[in-house]
Amino acid sequence: MTEAPRQGPLEGLAVLDLSTNLASAFTTLLFADFGAEVIQVERPGGSHLRRMAAWPFWMRGKKSIVLDLNDPADAEVARSLAVGSDVVVEGLGPRRADRFGLGYELLAEQNPRLVYTSITGFGRDGPFAHLKAYEAVVMAKTGSMYGNIAPRRPGEPVMTTPFGATFAGALLAIQGTLIALHERQTSRHGQRVDATLVQGMLAQDPWSYFMKVLADRYPGAYTAVGAPAPGRRMPTSWLSFGLLNGYSRDGRWLQFAHATPRQFEAFVRALGLEWARADPAWKDAPDSDDDDVRDRWWTLMLEAVRNRSVEEWQAVFDADNDVFAEVYLSGLELFDHPQVVHDGHVVEVDDPDLGRLKEMGVLVKMSATPGSPSAPAPRLDEHGGELRKRQAPQTPPPTRTYTSAPPPVGLPLEGLTVVDLGTFYAGPFASTMLADQGATVIKIEPLEGDPIRFQMPIPESAGVRVTQGKKSVAVDVFKEEGRVIALELIRRADVVLHTYRGGVAERMGLDANAAHAVNPDLLYHHGVGYGVDGPYARRAAFAPTIAAASGFARRSGGGGPEGGELTMEEIKDATVRMGGAPPGHPDGMAALGAAVGMLLGLYARDRGAGGQVTMTSMLSTMGHVLSDVLIDYDGAPAPVTTDPDGYGFSALYRLYRASDGWIVLCAPWPEDWTKLTRALPDQLGLTADPRFGDPASRHEHDGELAATLAEAFEAATAAEWERALSEAGVGCAEVAPMQGGLAMGLFLPGGVCDQLGYLTTVEHPIFEEHIRSTELVRLSRGRSRLEAGCLIGQHTDEVLRDVLGYDDETIDLLRSSRVIG
């Protein structure tokens, strides 16, 4: 994409970040990258983030002021800055902002245009509001703390490493803030935005929860998959064989990417196994109910993979775009990925203290209003004098007069039309989230339907979630009459979401140039796997391959031994650990990122930028998820890692056995120590023990501290420890059991999200009444439109008749000509 050297789309916005936690830092980073003035309030001594390697990335382009919010004078400075802002972001925890005089109601009285975004773990109210918003607490409480990274502890919880829930919650906060700013353009009033880490996790499950819904509804027909059994897991269908993990001749693990029948057959040919697909004895082996048959097919495939080196496999990929795999990368290797280099996703920033830094660039590529990630992070309180002078406590806050009351509650994106040209989940779920907020989303799909509808053995079941609230128009856009229909819809749209591989839009005649020719004011967003053009743009991108290529899988404890020869049994045994224990899903993260990209482009248009082309990719979005690792400069601290068995990072951020289960303890900062020791039994003598007297001593004797705490925690139940430590202000949660796939447990009746009111029921045309999530981010003056999924072409006639004005005779002719379905 060609980027014009113009100012960022958020130039002139004032954003105040009252928190110094990672979720708020992720959120306000985007606003700083795209031109807003972001003021970061830091506690005396500085943000805890400054102790982490990636703080120069998370804090870049911001201004720093040190304020002690417990000091009335400093709290008044913060209050004055807040009243003068367009956006306030806070993650202080329920009711803490109110205690400092920084709550939404008080600030909105003085500045009705204020958008006030709160980020919590489980919401500001409700049964879990008291729990600290730590990544591990959210993962524990939702049953997401499982994975096969610790073979000596099969079936037990493990500490997840990346900040998946935190990043997902931040993307929801950005979404909600941009939606509120868009709505403010017409209402002239701000509102409160509520985002949670747990709802960020709700975005991570494309279809697993719905498989359980069907299995529970029809127990005689289907069996729900529970927690995976320890040990080897054999592929169970052509799809899982298509997403094969294999070991190359030169000792590298490959994650293959074949999630459609056509791609799978191409893969079989590339392996030299087409003979087996013609042999009646082998033809249906990938889908056989016989474990021995599938195991022998598995062996054939793995042996064929091992016959080539990575370089030789690359030659195969170059010859056939339907065959592909990614090598499992780790650490900084993503910086050298050919597509990342091609798209300029990595930037270098000069820091006055740290020198030259290499880090991820902006999250969203924009053709007309690009961001600028070149400004370094501020020194501690670097702007304190300037900001105190600007907003001195004795200076009356700015006053603004409004003649009208806030408008009534409504759909915040009502009137917005999105044309969805996409398949699967990573892009299209982004427009689903916009549909929940009131946008009209018209999904253009081929006559045979989006392939996601047939990913599971029960047709349509895998597409239920991604088609929620959309109008499906089945049309063959490769025919001229079909292309005309699509272009007429685009002519009337505000946004086009395109997620196909590179070159497909051009073959459709629906690329950005063609779209802008009929609608110059259009926002055209590419929510792609790799890129619009470049070396990998035509490659298939699926969650497992992106997890491997980005380093997410290895960062999550996945991957296998490399570099030497492995027996076939060793290769098969290693596959159980390839995915690790990921706190999130690349498809879900990409969808959250694509929604941000569309809303950022929309708000830029609101402010006069006009139509433009924007892009987010699965690969670069996962680079942002892994930003704690993906930063490089001299003297950078090493990223934190768990111990080999996956218990945790240290004695004070770790899993512990209780008398009846497991808890997670999150007390990593010095101020947590006092709260923890007060809540634990006196006889432990922690405060009097010189080994634990200060942070340095606790670090030196970390193993001994862990052993002492482990013994103490076995004396009571997990629920008792959660209650006692949470009441003391310490991060702690009982670890919920695994409920199958990642985030599946979030949809359980009576579970965490059900108790929080984050689930509802809808009526599907095939599957009748079933549960679904509510909108994933909530606005105080916004209601939602929560609908069921749709069938292929369910709204074709309605849209052609009511939107485009086609008569019944023309519609019948188009259908008989196989232009529409």
Image (tube, helix red, strand yellow):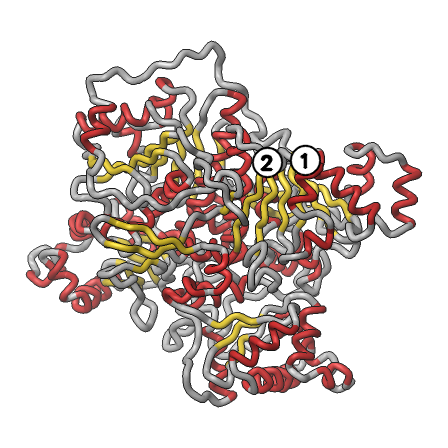
Seen at 18% across and 65% down, the residue is 702
Q: Residues within 10 Å of mark 1 (few under 14, many from 20)?
A: some
| Residue at the image point whose x is 70% and y is 47% from the top | 510
* 93, above or below 675, in the image: above
Can residue 529 be seen in this snapshot? yes
User: Image height check: is 810 above or below 48?
Assistant: above
Pick whichever, 343 or 680, lies toward us: 343
Instruction: Compare marks 2 and 1 and give the one earlier in the sequence.
Output: 1
Q: Position of residue 497 (x, y in %)?
A: 62, 45
* Contact between labelled residues 1 and 2, with CB atoms less than 8 Å apart: yes
- The reply to whether residue 155 is visible in this rendering is no
Q: Quadrant of residue 668?
A: bottom left
Residue at which label 1 appears: 519
Residue kind at label 1, given as amino acid type: Asn
Image check: 534 left or right of 374? right
- Report the Cα–Cα distance between label 2 and label 1: 8 Å
The residue positioned 48% from the left and 90% from the top of the image is 567
Badge 2 crowding class, 10 Å Cα cut-off, few under 14, some 14 to 19, many 20 or more, is many
Judging depth in this view, the residue of 437 and 365 nearest the camera is 365
Q: Nearer the viewer, residue 492 or 231?
A: 492
Q: Amino acid at mark 2?
A: Gly
Q: Position of residue 481 (x, y in %)?
A: 84, 45
Q: Residue 299: x and y, percent?
A: 59, 86
Q: Which residue is mark 2?
A: 611
Q: Is residue 511 left or right of residue 816?
A: left
Position of 560 relative to 391 (above/below): below
- Examine the image and state in which quarter residue 74 appears: top left
Identify the element where label 2 is drawn: loop
Q: Residue at point 36% right, 35% down?
A: 89
